[in-house]
Image (cartoon, grey):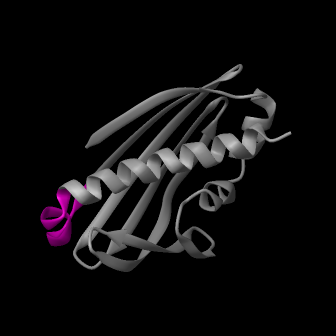
Amino acid sequence: MTKLSGQEKIKSEEKALSFFSDEGNLLQCIPGVKSVNGKKFVIEAKLGPLRAELSGEVKEYEVKERQVSNLLQVDGPGLIVLIRTRLNIQGSDLLWEAEYSMEGSLAKALMNTISKQAEDVSKQIISCTLSKINQS
């Protein structure tokens, strides 16, 4: 698994906790989402030179006090991507960690490209989340 982490400023701990109490807010921040049906979603993604429609699902979503964790699984032809995110809200700080892993024949063939895109998606989700929490 590859790990990313960071620390971001938030305007309101209360607003952050309210935002994270609804897992639907996570789905709104996943880039390329075409449709959502409960915990399942469909995204359009560019995988190197290929465009593909991938299906995804929120496998886990848990909020405990000031900690939020979730697990997303995205499936496509020859590809399974797992992205686990952990957030810790501490006053005006949001500490985050994301881990992702890939399996399948396409993942092996496009490892560097998919790895970079998984990293970009993780960062875009964090950025979107911050903008929604910090809007006035």
Q: Which SS type dominates the magenta stretch? A: helix
- In the image, the segment drawn in magenta is 102-111
Compared with residue 40, is residue 90 higher up or lower down, i.e. above or below? above
Q: Residue at x 71, y 52 (%)?
A: 22
Indicate the quadrant containing the N terminus: top left, top right, bottom left or bottom right.
Answer: top left
Q: Quadrant of residue 113 in the image?
A: bottom left
Judging depth in this view, the residue of 73 and 10 nearest the camera is 10
Compared with residue 79, is residue 116 higher up or lower down, i.e. above or below? above
Q: Quadrant of residue 55 in the image?
A: bottom left
Farthest residue, direction top: 91
Image coordinates for residue 50, horizontal then vertical, percent: 29, 77
Q: Residue at x 35, y 56 (%)?
A: 117
Q: Quadrant of residue 107 in the image?
A: bottom left
Farthest residue, direction front: 49
- 89 left or right, relative to 112: right
Indicate the quadrant containing the C terminus: top left, top right, bottom left or bottom right.
Answer: top right
Q: Residue at x 56, y 43 (%)?
A: 126
Farthest residue, direction right: 136
Judging depth in this view, the residue of 24 and 131 nearest the camera is 131
Q: Residue at x 36, y 79 (%)?
A: 52
Image coordinates for residue 29, horizontal then vertical, percent: 61, 56
Image coordinates for residue 60, horizontal then vertical, percent: 50, 54
